[in-house]
Image: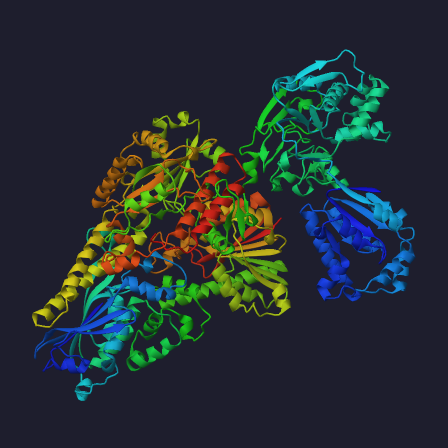
Amino acid sequence: MLLSISTTYQPATDLGYLLGKHPGRFQSKELPFGNAHVFFPEASDKVCTASLLLELNPVELLKSGSNNFDGGFQLEHFVNDRPYVASSFLTTAISKVFGSALNGNCKERPELAETPIPLVAELPCLPVRGGEAVLRRFFEPLGYEVEATQHPLDEQFPNWGSSAYFSVRLRQNIQLQHLLSHLFVLIPALDHNKHYYMGKEEIEKLLEKGGDWLKQHPEQEFITRRYLKNRGALAKEALSRLVVEDEQAEEEETVDMKERVEKTKLHDIRLRAVVEQLKASGARSVLDLGCGEGKLIRLLMPHGQFDKIRGMDISLRTLQIAQRRLNLSDASPAMKERIALFQGSLTYRDARLDGFDAAALVEVIEHLDEARLDALQKVLFGHARPSTVVITTPNGEYNVLFEGMPEGKFRHSDHRFEWTRSQFRAWCDKVCEAHGYQAEVLPLGDEDETHGAPSQMAVFQRV
Amino acid sequence: MQIQIPELSLIALVGPSGAGKSSFAKRHFLPTEVVSSDYCRALVSDDELNQSVSSEAFDLLHYIIAKRLKLGKLAVVDATNVQAEARKSLIALAKEHHVLPVAIVLDLPLRTCIDRNAARTDRNISGKVIQHQHREMRGIIARLKKEGFRQIFVLRNAEEVEAVAVSRTKMWNDKKHESGPFDIIGDVHGCFLELKELLGKLGYKVTKHKERNLFDKHFGYSVTPPIGSNRKVVFVGDFVDRGPASNEVLRLVMSMAKQGTAICVPGNHDDKLNRKIGGSDVQMRHGLEQTWQQLATEPPEFLKEVRKFLEALISHYVFDNGRLVVAHAGLREEMQGRASAEVRSFCLYGETTGEADEFGLPVRYNWAKEYRGRAVVVYGHTPVLQPEWLNNTIDIDTGCVFGGQLTALRYPERELVSVPAKEVYYEPTRPFEAQAPLLSLQQENDDLLHLEDVLGKRHISTRLIKNVLIREENATAALEVMSRFAINPKWLVYLPPTMSPGETSVQPDHLERPEEVFDYFKKIGIRQVICEEKHMGSRAVVAICKDEAAALGRFGVQNEGIGKVWTRTGRSFFPEDNALESAFLQRFCKALSNADFWEKHQTEWALFDCELMPWSAKAQGLITNQYAAVGASAKAALPAVLSAMKAAEARGVEMNGFVNSYGERLAMAGQFVESYRRYCWEVASLDDYRLAPFHLLATEDKAHFDKNHVWHMEEIHAICNQDPGFLLATPYRLVDFEAPETVTAAIEWWEALTANGGEGMVVKPLDFIANRESEKLVQPALKCRGREYLRIIYGPEYTLPRNLSLLKKRSLGQKRSMASREFALGVEALERFVQKEPLRRVHECVFGVLAMETEGVDPRL
């Protein structure tokens, strides 16, 4: 909502020329989402401060912006922090109100615009995802002296902890254009939010504003990812990747790149192991239960052994992504007959699951409440009864080996449990006894001597 | 000539082109009943003579016929049908749908056909073709019977065709006009004494005649129904074999049938006896040998009468406008009211797979497990220890001859009446299950729900709204929520409806006021309403049982504690804390026990609609991510803005009134924070929770929607008194629109409540389900929220006049319509649950509520 820029360059009032605003006047500009005002709380020869105030009206914001919210109504669209914080709205206002300065132009003082001068930028309410450390990682490499105060969520409820909001003061001898371009890129990157739909032009914008300095910045990748709101696909100019990846990425947000790579590796190991088991089982028809975006199906596809592959998932949205990724909509009739997807649930009996040689549930069961596993077990082993069933699930014992993972937490916010090896074994035994199967449980990933492998896989054979 | 056909039959017209089939069909049948091959040819190719598309045209013809027969509609096939192949496929269709195939043959002279065809201007078929067809007719009539046609009518010339009259007869099994009341009696198997005793217990008077062989009057007995009633007995068959007096049973039953006090369907044993008397070589086993000996003591004329009686028995009956079906071994829905050899065989023997069990008895496929029909099916055939309802069917053969009982089902009362066997007359080959199972037959059957019962576009008929439509996309979304987040569907027998606010207030600085809410009810003719304080917590439905045994008995749930607490969307209230949930339920249970609740309501379980405080207990995420965040950001930003503005103003800059307006905004941010804080407190243990029940939804056999809200409030107050530190009795006021002082008092009460930071109140018609004058359902409740509370919903600055004027343009139509439909579904779910209907029937309604909630509606309403 507010950005103040001060200088002690003499004469300080030249700041008015640099910004193209008269220090004596309260000036307003109408923007699509509200009004921007510029005024000078201080304007002496020694010190001059210009304030950019952006007024958003939440009611009007909703009226104009409701199309941006993909159809759903959520309470947060009506009551949110946007009117009070520094966000992409504010950076848009910077580009509209201080456009010349942002581009390094100044008619009255052209040399001054290209000269580093002592500048202080103040943001009374800057939302920072990731805390003070991230804030410093973003600004300090650029040469700023950073002062930051974090606000509590509610002083009456200390247990609720801190809010994401910081009062921030940034100080440096710097060209005004550079200060503004840093803010333009880093405010939305810190907020990790954008008020508008992001298209390819976002990449252009980023390259334009961050072109020179971003290349040198040690956090270049992190900033890019954040600025593009983690649309990894955007960075790769592949617009097909959407929501779900987004969610995953957000959850792993604070995880290091190293760990992220490891997680990806583990998932590949897991999928390859499942494919091997399915191949070895001699199955011709395979069900991928909880197929998600179709990663397993993609791996199964090349193997001629599988002449009927069906993917089921509970989420229609995920299935749409899978459909697109596997190019199923425009596939040949033969491929459509061989591979198909449908929505379904593992807690309801479903005749469509009958008559398959094998079924795979890769990282699925831990997304169900333990109490509902009884239903899953009856649906799958009692009624569908494929000859082979492959189930993978995390090994909870291994969690202690993940750096920075708090005790008692799970690897994914939707996991309802992460079993130890013996818990998984016990469940498998129960299933086998009740439904006439035999199961072998295997480790997935590199094994630790005491804690086992990061993931585990059970291979059930109908007796 | 008079042609009499069953009202449900497949009629094949047979005759060459030019025989006049189409004119005949037109004269005697509805245009929609007639499906012609020429018409189908035209439909697929625009040319009704195009022989090259015959295969497609006949596919279509068969498809239409199949649809009609499936729906129980007569169908007439207008095609030459001179080729055996064509007729064969029609016979197969009739068989598949269990309808009678009828052939009407127009065997007219060749000359007539050729002349007629030549006279036609619209088309012309060569004489050769007709000649060929005519030749194919030769000998056809003799073959039709063998091919499977059950009725064959032949018309030889134009005069005969002209003189024909077609009439339709009702199906023999159609007794839809008879609505009872009935006493349906299970397998008797010659247990005469028990039958007599049971009839006595049911109130029938049985008189034995001295002269026993006046067969034109009776067979030895006269039976009169209970005094002052028109009750009738319906026997499910198996009168004979194994028992001590099959002959006497036959005398009694046949007397009753003759006198019109009983309706009988045959059992497999009766059928076998019939064949024996008819001279067939049947094996004298399974008790037939006893029957045969007993009948040997009777005069031979009696045997002839028995033969007549058995021969005339119809496989099954459909009674009471299609609501009741009686068949010896039960009957699938698609066979009810139909006639075929297969139907008869099903009625007599049930469904077998050819498999035999360890006792050498045929393994029966339990058709009732998959029964989805609306008609109640009452049957016998397989002895059971205790009759149990399963998917609207019931087996009432309680094995009297094996030393069990002889049972009757009173219809429509659904009461069971039985008498014990006086002795074991016959050792059962397969022993009775000695121990009663843990779960009822229905619960066992309900163990898993079927996807097909919830997915796709659905119409749910409820008692309050005839037809509630669930859109496919909503069901799709609900499936995800239900599967990923909801509790065990065996607990989840109810979800509360959404609630609309009253009309927007006309007062300039309010969005909601009581006046508009009262006006709504007054206008639709409701005289009395109740105003209940609206607690600001989270909506919670609580299922609670006396103990775990009751949880198993009533909900079929094992090892999940004595109850469950769930949210508006079916999620567990305490997903990560079983111990807390268990302590919570124990505490509530104790209060119920102390209030003598279980005894008073004759129940071991109950379902309550409640508000659970504090709000912060369930909504912590929402509060910290959203409300506290808004407050924190406003309080960080606004003072900075204000001080910058003041500094500029001090310098002499004209600030255009902005300083004042930002002062105001800062104040409103403070009010906003105060508003949400009121509903938050830390929860460290059970003692920090408060539960405010406001509806006692259901107890054993009863859904309490027939009681008014004062009853609910008083019942609940009595419980709350037992543990006031935990249970919150909801304060309420009654308003009678004819007593203006009660209206004023309620408004003042609301003002005082909301001035103190209360959320507001909920206004309901005094009756739970209000009598409506129009077709539309009265809103079950309207909320009226306080000005400060609404700041949380509409934002800190909603009270600014420019914001308010925008917000006032809100539309309530969709919200209200949803509230009505969800209310109807909720009521239906519980009514079905207390009547012990299959879980899928309850789940369907609950799923429907969830599906509706996925509809996009302004969440601030």
B262 relative position to B852: left or right: right
* Vertical side of B588 occupied by A439: above or below: below
Q: In the image, what residue occupies the spot 63% across and 66% down?
A: A304
Pick the front one: B9 or A114: B9
Residue B250, by quadrant, is: top right
* Vertical side of B16 occupied by B487: above or below: above
Residue B319, position as x, y percentages in the image: 65, 34
B104 relative position to B777: left or right: right
Pick the front one: A281 or B158: B158
Residue B528, position as x, y percentages in the image: 34, 36
Q: How is the image coloured?
A: rainbow
B472 relative position to B634: left or right: right
Q: Is residue B16 at least partly visible in the picture?
A: yes
Residue B124, by quadrant, is: bottom right
Pick the front one: B293 or B562: B293
Q: Is residue B454 at least partly visible in the picture?
A: no
Q: Where is the N terminus of chain A found, in terms of image quarters? A: bottom left
* Vertical side of B729 occupied by A434: above or below: below
Residue A207, position as x, y percentages in the image: 34, 80
Pick the front one: B391 or B83: B83
Labels in figure, total:
0
